[in-house]
Amino acid sequence: MVGREKELKIRFVPGCCELVEEDVDVPSRRVLITGATGLLGRAVFKEFNENNWNAVGCGYRRAQPRFEQINLLDSIAVHDIIHEFQPHVIVHCAAERRPDVVESQPDAASQLNVAASGNLAKEAAGVGAFLIYISTDYVFDGTSPPYKETDVPNPLNLYGKTKLEGEKAVLENNEDAAILRIPILYGEVERLEESAVTVMFDKVQFSNKSANMDHWQQRFPTNVKDVAAVCRQLAEKRMLDPSVKGTFHWSGNEQMTKYEMACAIADAFNLPSSHLRPITDCPVVGALRPRNAQLDCSKLEMLGIGQRTPFRAGIKESLWPFLVDKRWRQTVFH
């Protein structure tokens, strides 16, 4: 569905320029994305924007000029943008997602992950918008995978606890909202540090010194493009069927430790991996992590929703701009 709107444009003619009104096609389905400057938020914005949605993204520190600058802790600003834009769908990607940062800054993390999420859910309900709250596999303790949406959460770390409290705050304020739990993410990063997967690339590339890699925790690396597609499909399904709500799981289906991911990255770029050392002990530094919080995704699959990119293909696409050896890039991609 597309609506017609007037847009002012500058037309250049010999000797001067003049403002003219032109008709432009604007999709009538509106979506607001929080955290649109982040790794997942950028992918979600792009997915909706390229699939006939009128998408508005908001962020905070890195927002302008591309996105709206909104402090999600400012309830008046949140109210204003939602009531002005009147979105049909809100995808809430903004969060403090780094477990060790949450442990060191618990109050700030709770404000963003819990309080802001509850308020956003309330405002979404006020305009009849479908809210998708992005949560995490870390709500589970990792002792009895795979986890269905109906399994009882038991987070081991404060990050998992704040995201679980955020889930509850969302559903208390908006019973028609959706919770989407996802695992470790990777994708087209602006900096390698944006993802716990891509951050390993330098250790893989610099094979002149050995690197310890966790070979204890079982992970399911998931491409942000796939999560973005799931969000869009879920939103479009909901617009046809109001019963689409509640908790959902989505995840890649390749089980890997970080050591195995690093070896797969090395393999994808024909780099050596003999300097990578698997560490099979439970990590003792930082926030506790679940051993295996595999998510059962059959609920979404039965709705016909889902997309999965093979890890080797996705990681090559994500990391090749960060290759140190540019000669390799030229031979493979040109």
Image: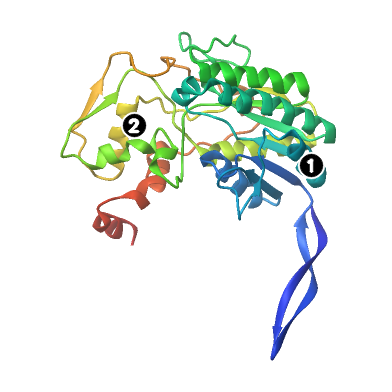
Q: What amino acid does circle 1 point to?
A: Asp
Counting from the top left corner in percent of width and height, residue 152 is at: 59, 9
Numbered label tally: 2
| Res 175 seen here | no
Q: Is residue 100 left or right of residue 166?
A: left
* C-beta proximity under 8 Å, tags 2 and 1: no
Label drawn at residue 97: none
154, above or below 10, in the image = above
Give the image quarter of residue 42. Answer: top right
Q: What amino acid does circle 2 point to?
A: Met
Name the residue at 52% across, 20% down.
Answer: 159
Name the residue at 51% across, 36% down.
Answer: 308
Instruction: Identify the image's colour scheme: rainbow, by chain, secondary structure or one colour.
Output: rainbow
Disc 2 secondary structure class: helix
Q: Nearer the viewer, residue 85 or 265?
A: 85
| First in sequence: mark 2 vs mark 1 | 1
Which residue in the structure is indicated by mark 2? Answer: 261
Counting from the top left corner in percent of width and height, residue 147 is at: 54, 15
Q: Residues within 10 Å of mark 1 (few under 14, many from 20)?
A: few
Counting from the top left corner in percent of width and height, residue 85 is at: 79, 46
Q: Residues within 10 Å of mark 2 (few under 14, many from 20)?
A: many
Name the residue at 39% across, 20% down.
Answer: 218
| Res 113 seen here | yes
Q: Is residue 290 left or right of residue 62?
A: left
Which residue in the structure is indicated by mark 1? Answer: 80
